[in-house]
Amino acid sequence: MKKHIFVVKTWLFMLCLALIVYVPSCKKDITNGTKQPAVNSAASRLNVTATNAELIAYKSSAHQLMVGYYRTWGDKIVSGDVNGPAMTDMPDSVDIICNFTDYTPGSSPYWPALKNTYIPALHAKGTKVVNTTSLPNTTSDTSYTNHYTNNSTGYAAWALATYNSYNAMGYDGIDLDVESNPSGSVLTADVGLMNALSQYFGPKSTTGKLLIFDTNQTGSNSLFTQIYTKINYVFLQAYWRQTSTLSSTFNTFASYINPNQFVVMVDFEDGSGDGQNSSYVYNPVQIYQYASWQPTQGTKGGVGSYGIDNEYYQIANGVHNIYTRHAIQMMNPPQTTSSTNAVSLSSGKISAGDVTQLKSTSAFTLESWVYFNAVGSWNNILAKSNTSTDRIAVQTGGGDNSLYVILGNGSNSYGYTAANAVTAGQWYHVAVVFDGTQSTNASKLKLYINGTLQTLTFSGTIPSSTSSTNTAAFLAGSETTSSTNTYLSGKIDEIRVWNAALSQSTISAWMNKSLGTCHPNASNLKLYWQLDNAASNATAVASLSTTYTGTITSGVYTASTQASTTSGCP
């Protein structure tokens, strides 16, 4: 695997010793062992939220996998770097994380954190955690002589001990590193061990735990050709290979496995070796090349990276592991569908009640698609309005087809576009972004129409935060619950409220997509109405784990091909 693998070879032995505090010792398992129930079912997952349920459903579907070798020495617990990653910081859409260690199990608080925190939290998102190790060799590795004898009985006892130890930790499988072409007595022992392991790991077992053949070899490897029916995946340590060689390498495996069992790995460690270097990731473009590559025989199993913990330091707009995230999107592109509905309003509105995240805040973003039957004066798209000096609103102007963005906190301050910014009979995407930390009106309050920044003329000084006393309902289609002259005549769709100032690039990239957990500001989403729930004309359903349900008054769902949405996340 890497230069640290010589330490990993002793990992299985040390794991058994360390797990004395968790399970009966390995020695006891060998002499009088029984198989323990598998700890990998849905019932073992913690805190399975609606968002996590979406991730679990995705990871249960047919798709190209993303795999990451997570090096323990890069974890913040081991490194002591408070700004470093935890295993749970890896992107939610990663399918399999390989725990890759050169630390003795039990010698660091990392191990109880792995067992009690990391693995349960990752299981809640449908992410599998396997451990990377290598097969012991009785002919040269004397540290294993007390753990099995070199015969079928010894192999079986060792495999059972391995299974029970891994199961106690909550691992979802074993990732076996094979970097040689064994022969003679070594091959005999390796085949015996693999066959014994396959009773508890891999497609021949009933535990659901993975058995992975992790190699830099070809499909002619002497061990692989004897055990290939017992494994779930081949992880090819392709690393610095050009994509032109991937097909020829897979062709050596093609007689034994399907393309969807073949996962190609890149290297995300630093260029000088295995030490941590947060400012450099080796050849990040290669993961895109590997993500795009496919065998001629069919769709590959996926892509992975060695040192995904190191790639954590590659950040854009506050989002970590940017190369991994993009590769996931490349392999599993959004599925385009048409939004089936919008809400048609006629002297009506949609009310969320008091959206508290819009009070006393220095940042928010409001988004909506809107269609005007007619553009009247002071027709409200979105609003939370208490008084003229205590409100948030985006509305049409006084008869000139302009748009106004109002943000009052003690005074009636606002910005407005030039005339004819909107016309009747067209759909528009409207986004308002507030960032009170900025110094000028134009930088504090921005309006985008169809992703394009509008030039605003301002009246008054835009405040640095919203009002703390504005308890009015957040509305779509009207300024207040009682006003009759501020209604929108038209249709509205895809309403979103964020407690962050979204960038123009993010707004443009996502305005035509339905939202998902891979949105860079997903944690800031506080209200989301997709407005496709035609089953109930009275309700705007809260989507994507948000909690604000809307009440629709004098509005009906209507078929719409606008705001065509894309499932923005895998």
Image (spheres, rainbow, N blue to C red):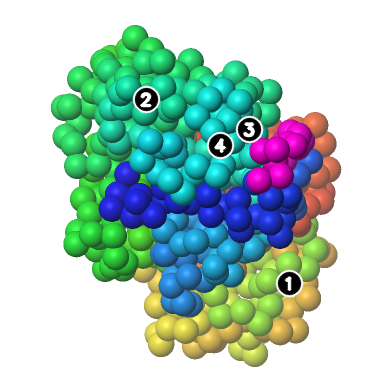
Q: Nearer the viewer, mark 1 or mark 3?
A: 3
Q: Residue at x 41, y 22 (%)?
A: 188
Whichever of labels 1 and 2 marks the residue nearer the N terminus, that label is: 2
Q: Residue at x 65, y 50 (%)?
A: 169
How far is mark 2 from mark 4, CA to CA?
15 Å
Classed neighbour count for the residue bearing mark 3: other residues with Cα under 10 Å, few (<14), some (14–19), many (≥20): many
The secondary structure type at the circle numbered 2 is: helix
Query: Looking at the image, which is closer to me, 74 or 23?
Result: 23
Tags 1 and 2 touching, CB below 8 Å: no
Q: Is residue 25 visible?
A: yes
Residue 60 at x, y percent in the picture: 61, 30
Query: Looking at the image, which is closer to me, 476 or 309?
Result: 309
Residue 192 at x, y percent in the picture: 49, 23
Q: Residue at x 73, y 51 (%)?
A: 23
The stretch drawn in magenta includes residue 37: yes
Q: Which residues make up the magenta segment? A: 27-39
The residue to which callout 1 is attached is 356
The residue to which callout 3 is attached is 157
Amino acid type at image mark 1? Thr
How far is mark 3 from mark 4, CA to CA?
7 Å
How far is mark 2 from mark 3, CA to CA?
19 Å
Q: Residue at x 28, y 53 (%)?
A: 3
Classed neighbour count for the residue bearing mark 1: other residues with Cα under 10 Å, few (<14), some (14–19), many (≥20): some
The residue to which callout 4 is attached is 148
Tags 1 and 4 touching, CB below 8 Å: no
Residue 36 at x, y percent in the picture: 75, 37
Tags 3 and 4 touching, CB below 8 Å: yes
* 521 lies above or below 159: below
The residue to which callout 2 is attached is 185
